[in-house]
Amino acid sequence: MSKAPNPARRSESSRRAILAATGDLCSEAGYGRLTIEAIAARAGVSKKTIYRWWPSKGAVVLELLGETATIATAPPDTGDLAADLHTMLTEIVDMLTPPRNSAGTGVISEALHDPDLARDLRERLIQPGIDAFKQRLRRAQETGRLHPDADLDVALDLLYGPIYHRMALHLGMPDPDYLRTLITHVLRALTPPAPH
Amino acid sequence: MSKAPNPARRSESSRRAILAATGDLCSEAGYGRLTIEAIAARAGVSKKTIYRWWPSKGAVVLELLGETATIATAPPDTGDLAADLHTMLTEIVDMLTPPRNSAGTGVISEALHDPDLARDLRERLIQPGIDAFKQRLRRAQETGRLHPDADLDVALDLLYGPIYHRMALHLGMPDPDYLRTLITHVLRALTPPAPH
Amino acid sequence: MSKAPNPARRSESSRRAILAATGDLCSEAGYGRLTIEAIAARAGVSKKTIYRWWPSKGAVVLELLGETATIATAPPDTGDLAADLHTMLTEIVDMLTPPRNSAGTGVISEALHDPDLARDLRERLIQPGIDAFKQRLRRAQETGRLHPDADLDVALDLLYGPIYHRMALHLGMPDPDYLRTLITHVLRALTPPAPH
Amino acid sequence: MSKAPNPARRSESSRRAILAATGDLCSEAGYGRLTIEAIAARAGVSKKTIYRWWPSKGAVVLELLGETATIATAPPDTGDLAADLHTMLTEIVDMLTPPRNSAGTGVISEALHDPDLARDLRERLIQPGIDAFKQRLRRAQETGRLHPDADLDVALDLLYGPIYHRMALHLGMPDPDYLRTLITHVLRALTPPAPH
DNA sequence: GGGTAAGCGAGACGGTACGTCAAGTCTTTCA
DNA sequence: TGAAAGACTTGACGTACCGTCTCGCTTACCC
């Protein structure tokens, strides 16, 4: 049984150096060529120090993404629902578009066969975004912009789905106009048909 | 430059053994633990033989998926559009649901940082499905079940998107009922609003 | 330059714990598997404390041997030279025979490529024995039991040599009878031939 | 269970490069600073290749000693017993004297806590020397130069012992004159006293 | 007898080497 | 001559200890 390290004594400077080195290497050579060895060397840090605080390179990159992310836990609310949705979607699209995509797709790729990483990814990066997204839609329901019976899970799937669909199959990220088209379609879909 | 091997002299039995071993190992230990070494050992085949005919382990698994897949090059057409869409979506959902999901998610995961594999994946597995999907929608337009101006690319994104979205973020594959809900929403979205 | 620690403030209990832990670990796993880390953990002591007072693990074990050793600074003198030599040789043989041999052979082994340790080993453990040995022989010369021209360095080499020879090459420690045989031979060798 | 490699397919050039690199590094930095990593790097060889054929660095150095050793399995026989013994002893003394001593003392040191290496050392380097030594003495008995009842094991211990004694305790290797003195003493010791 | 400097436990740190694993290449042997 | 068998170089893995270091704590000495 290995003892857990004491976070209070953790070296913040090492942590920063590791994340910085990870970011650099990820941009330079891509997630695929990223190795713990290289991170340690670049950061001037012992491999042990990385393994002490992260279980895998995926976890390091995930933390890096968490630092970098400008994901507001509170959704934008300009009053214009379509525009706000566009803003939120664009954030994800940007993260999955070159040159920033390496870390993001890398973590997603790794999470596909690493359940622990998958859980971390969901809890620390994805769920906050989902919550913010639904919060914005709920507000739209309160203001009457969106039908009160609209299914928010469906909205989430229909709006974010195309992005991951295209990522997974290398179909090219949607451009802003196409995003607007999608939003228009989805908002239309969310309004239940009037009963006869 | 290395000479290309002569496909005419290729050993079919080796090929079958390799694919069989790959399938077994994928089920047993998952794509993550799959290695060329293990495939060669299990198949009673030289590593060289694998490298001679496939560029990477992803390519082997892709070929395995191609063999296994019940790819409908022609879409189902029972006359019930929603039911036919459900059938086509379910095929993908099944491939990405345990216990069959290991090979599928594995290849997608690898394709995320291997452009060559990504192209092969698209051309050999995905595009036929997309073509069949659009063909079915086009037939629906001809029969008037779908509006003639409906955007088929949007339809594709909205229907397949949720599946990949959920796969990528480990949100759980949609169940049949939820699939039906999605189809209902999307078909509603595809009908352009009547101009005033 | 690092300041020398003040021996007056040294914790005797830590010192004892370290030596005790060292002895235990040496018996349990052998000198080869002995590490500073393990000593510190077993003794409930900081590694720093060990490094403060000893330059190497060899030095710790050497001090342990010094504590344990029943070093006769004065040689035995029963009047029977052969028996007294036997007693002195047996002391070394015991130290190099299981189960006590681990620490002894360990230090000798380390001293082979650590000159500082070698010097300490000689000064603190070996030289007193050599002095006692020669002192006993000198007394034998005075009593006429040994020829006054006998070369005491040769005596030392011939008597102790076989022990180290056998230790170094794993030829098995000499048993008491064989020791007696050796002593008989050596005493015979030490008597210079009468000149014609 | 790991499969044993097939010696028939072993690369002789790798083997030679490894032994050469080991020799160089041993001379340059000493056995203590010798590492498998460094040998591999210097030899332009994979670490795996070293581990495939040798269990430890000690075993590599032992093989190197075996190659280098000029130990004739047949003893010298010039007719002059004392001179021949001197020749045989000098061979060992040379091996344990700078600058050649690093490999020899290193292996002996390691063998002190590695029983497998100790066995190899004895079987491959030591025993042939012992056999040759005894063979020469037996011949001396046949020619009447040595008493037929002389104990050859005692002879071995008394002649080689001093060398290892001095090695183990860093007492300085015996010089040629002192070796001759020892031989004189031992030959005298080996002649049983005439019965009354 | 209160302040302070040391020894101390704990353990994180930058390192070096370990021994293992798989990738992909190359050579030898067999059918 | 294609394929099996498998040895080879490469390079990263994750681990074990090294010896140094920084923390608080406590303990003993000195003003």
Image: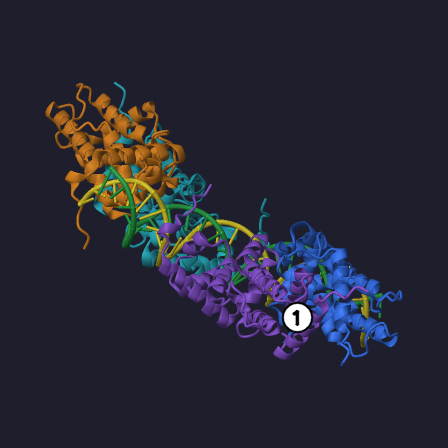
Chain colours: A cyan, B orange, C blue, D purple, E green, F yellow
Q: Amino acid at mark 1?
A: Arg
Q: Residue at x 67, y 62 (%)?
A: D148
C143 sits to left or right of B44: right
The answer to which of D67 and D98 lies nearer the viewer is D67
Q: Which residue is mark 1?
A: D166
* Residue A155, picture quadrant: top left
Residue toward you, C154 or D103? C154
* Residue C178 shows in the view: yes
Question: Residue at left 34%, top 28%?
Answer: B174
- The image quadrant where one finds the N terminus of chain A is top right
Q: What crowding class fits label 1: few (fewer than 14 Cα within 10 Å), some (14-19), or many (20 or more)?
A: some
Residue D169 image offset from top left, x and y in percent = 67, 69
Relative to B79, A108 lies left or right: right
Tell me if residue C55 can be seen. no
Is A37 positioned to the left or the right of A161 in the image?
right
> Closest to the observer: D151 or D29?
D151
Against B22, is D9 above or below? below
Give me the chain letter of mark 1.
D
